[in-house]
């Protein structure tokens, strides 16, 4: 059965992600390791890391997913920005390895003012530099599917494969974002198209490469190439798309993590909506 959870704040102390996840009745959680819109990196103290590890053992929350900063752009043709992004990911991945965080999700990058081919080359150059510094043993690096907004790379399965191809023997995988793939042109709320998309993933990667699903409805229409998340059932995907994922033989066993708007009690409402879409099997 699917593991249902949400993104929680890591403000003040990283170990508090467990308390916040428990408050929301989340079975799995995602969190940032720094402010997603700031470059500053503050090393975690030994007391804070020890408390994180203690709660990791105590709380029944699994898996743990860290999300990379929104500022990182491994595809950038601005060498200063690309280098800062590489260093930022090295810092975050090193902490993930130390704390045994199971998955680290990142956006592959944006090809602004350059061709997509050059953007992909820049991503691969950046990843080569990252893998030279960090050996992934405890953490799996997940490439997130993107909507194709503002030059984003990884908007199609083939494009994601071209990015990931040199690293398929590394500890890597894929994070599907339902809003992103729908906005990128995959009609996942219709059974036939959902199955076509699933078959496409199987063809390029094998389904076992998909490790996490970001579970978001879409504020914008199909194929809009916009990244605008909405509450479950309130957007243009509707309940059907989530029902197909949650009851799929493979996807239905994965962690589903909400990145929907943080308003009132909506995390609990959205998680309950997802749970209610799961068919009870005799």
Image: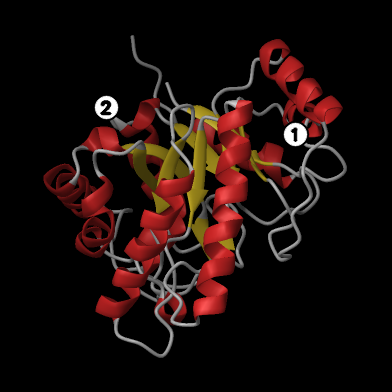
SS of the residue under disc 2 = loop
Mark number for residue 17?
A: 1
Left or right of residue 260, residue 254 in this image: left
Residue sitting nearer the eye, 1 or 153: 153
Count the marks: how many?
A: 2
Q: Position of residue 138 (x, y in %)?
A: 48, 27
Q: Is residue 83 above or below residue 26?
A: below
Which residue appears at 46% of the width and 67% of the height?
Answer: 74
Of labels 2 and 1, the one closer to you = 1
* Residue that numbered label 2 is attached to: 249
Mark number for residue 187?
A: none
Which residue appears at 38% of the width and 25% of the height?
Answer: 253
SS of the residue under disc 1 = helix
State whether residue 154 appears in this view.
Answer: no
Could you tell which of marks 2 and 1 lies nearer the N-terminus?
Answer: 1
Between the residue at mark 2 and the residue at mark 1, the CA separation in whole angstroms equals: 30 Å
Q: Position of residue 282 (x, y in %)?
A: 33, 9
């Amino acid at each position: 059965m699917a593991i249902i959870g949400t993104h929680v704040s890591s403000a003040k102390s990283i170990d508090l992600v467990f308390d916040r996840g428990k408050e929301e009745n989340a079975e799995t959680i995602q969190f940032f390791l720094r402010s997603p819109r700031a470059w500053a990196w503050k090393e975690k103290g030994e007391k804070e890391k020890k408390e994180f590890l203690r709660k990791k053992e105590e709380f029944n929350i699994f898996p743990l997913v860290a999300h990379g900063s929104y500022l990182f752009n491994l595809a950038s043709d601005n060498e200063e920005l690309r280098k800062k992004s590489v260093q930022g990911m090295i810092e975050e991945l090193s902490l993930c390895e130390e704390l045994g965080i199971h998955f680290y999700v990142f956006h592959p990058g944006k090809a602004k003012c350059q061709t997509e081919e050059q953007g992909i080359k820049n991503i691969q150059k950046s990843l080569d530099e990252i893998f030279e510094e960090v050996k992934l043993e405890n953490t799996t690096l997940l490439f997130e599917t993107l909507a194709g907004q503002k030059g984003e790379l990884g908007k199609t399965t083939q494009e994601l494969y071209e990015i990931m191809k040199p690293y398929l023997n590394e500890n890597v995988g894929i994070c599907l974002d339902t809003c992103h793939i729908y906005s990128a042109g995959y009609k996942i709320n219709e059974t036939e198209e959902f199955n076509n998309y699933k078959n496409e993933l199987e063809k390029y990667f094998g389904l076992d490469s998909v490790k996490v699903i970001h579970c978001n409805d879409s504020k914008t229409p199909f194929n809009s190439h916009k990244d605008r998340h909405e509450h479950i059932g309130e957007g243009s995907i509707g309940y059907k798309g989530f029902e197909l994922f949650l009851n799929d033989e493979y996807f239905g066993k994965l962690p589903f993590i909400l990145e929907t708007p943080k308003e009132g009690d909506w995390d609990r409402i959205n998680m309950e909506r997802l749970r209610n879409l799961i068919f009870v099997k005799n």
